[in-house]
Amino acid sequence: MRFALVCVLFIAAPVAAKGPPKARRVIVWSIDGFAAGYLKHPEFRRLPVWQRLLKNAQVFESVETTYPAVTYPAHTAMVTGRPAAAHTLRSNHPVDPFNLSKGGWTWFLQDVAGKTIWDIARTQNRRVANLMWPVTMTETGRIRYHIPQFDRAKGPEEIKLMRVLSTPGLHREIEKKTGVALSEYSSDADRFKAALYLWQSKKPDIMYLYQPGLDSLEHAKGAYAAEAFDHLAKLGTEIETMLKLIRKAHDTSILIVSDHGFMTYKGKCYPNVILQKLGYIDLAKKTWDYWFDTAGGIARLVDNSSQFEFDHAAVKKEIETACPTIAYVHKGHADFSLLRTEYSGDAEAFLVSRERVILNAAIASEIFDAEATGHTHGFLPEREDMKTVALLFTPQKKTGVRIKNVADVFRATCRLAALKCPVQKSAATAKKTP
């Protein structure tokens, strides 16, 4: 198992330019689940639209994502420039052992530590548009043109809710002008149609667009399925449409980003079954002292202000015996410090899948299901199947943009939009093989 150690230093200095920087416009466009492996796949190379796009783009072919390699921590890193341990959004779901949130996700921006792009832009009189970017449930005044991502219902009730949560009047305006009533269940095509209207009518300086359709197909069919390539062809056509629209605007860049790769898992481990067995979770009383917060192939131990000492040796023995290829990472392990720096600074232990076994937080009837299989992500970010891509289309001749990690999207957006942002400097990268 190899972990990439990246030391990050944040310095409160502006992205420098001689004299006042000229304001520029940027579209940050996320295609969820756009794995790095697509770029070299024979089927992808047979898609004419993408071959045209790649010829005109600055391509970042192997981008590492966050610990863990899941959607919400990665998208939050893109707008803060910080790893999950620093921005504190460490999973797609809240720690909720007894489902008090009724299937809730980590939607709320108040859980994020650090300034976001839209906070910075607002102080510099720059206007941001958000079209359903993850973790954007916040006061509507925080983002100038705001359609958050949220999901609590289906059908007409969901639409009513979205009208209330969005910038006053904006949701209805988009529906009236485009025929699209936006909700979590809107297709990628409808999201693009709404984004096209928003960009042309409101003329924001920065626009964030999130499209989850590829990721949904991959969960159902797997990465590199025929349906995935068909969908990518449609997305490529949308990108070309937008590029044609901005062709005469010499101040506009489009940055295509993504959050993680994809893989097929085999085997499922339920570590909280062990915590229940050892008395740390009481289902009858609905109380808990410790809980493994899982996110695909990685998990962190969460302490609920317990008065009981945790028996690491016993839990390690139980898990590593029952769940093959799952490593228990505790103080003294070579990778403990790295996981605390990148993933969760206060966790006393982590679980890491070395191969294809997935971790699940549910308290099931057994600890390990050897026959479980499916398609997912959330494993170590340095794995090749977890890496993703980025593509930059810009009229700027020298941008200085480099994207090696999804957190670099923050710095890239600041540069492209000529925002004065904190500079993120990366130290030398060291590799460990425990």
Image (tube, rainbow, N blue to C red):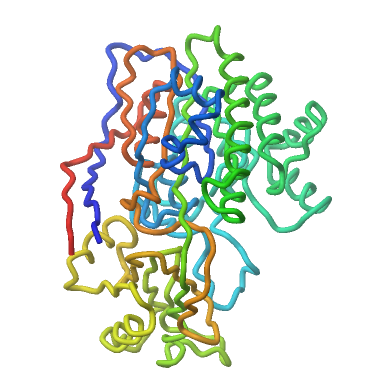
| Residue at 62% over, 20% down | 241
* Total numbered circles: 0
From the viewer's side, name the closer residue of 51 and 210: 51
Q: In the displayed image of the protein, which residue is found farthest to the top? A: 248
Task: Locate the N terminus and report the quarter of the image it occupies.
Answer: bottom left
Q: Please identify the quarter of the rendering in which residue 130 is found.
A: top right
| Residue at 57% over, 55% down | 219
Task: Locate the C terminus and report the quarter of the image it occupies.
Answer: bottom left
| Residue at 34% over, 62% down | 344
30 shown above or below 161: above
Where residue 279 appears, as percent x and y from the top left, is 43, 92
Give left or right: position of 235 versus 84: right
Where residue 126 appears, as percent x and y from the top left, is 50, 24
Where residue 424 appears, as percent x and y from the top left, is 28, 37
Where residue 58 appears, as percent x and y from the top left, is 38, 23
From the viewer's side, name the closer residue of 47 and 7: 47
Give left or right: position of 278 versus 199: left
| Residue at 53% over, 33% down | 29
From the viewer's side, name the closer residue of 85 and 188: 188
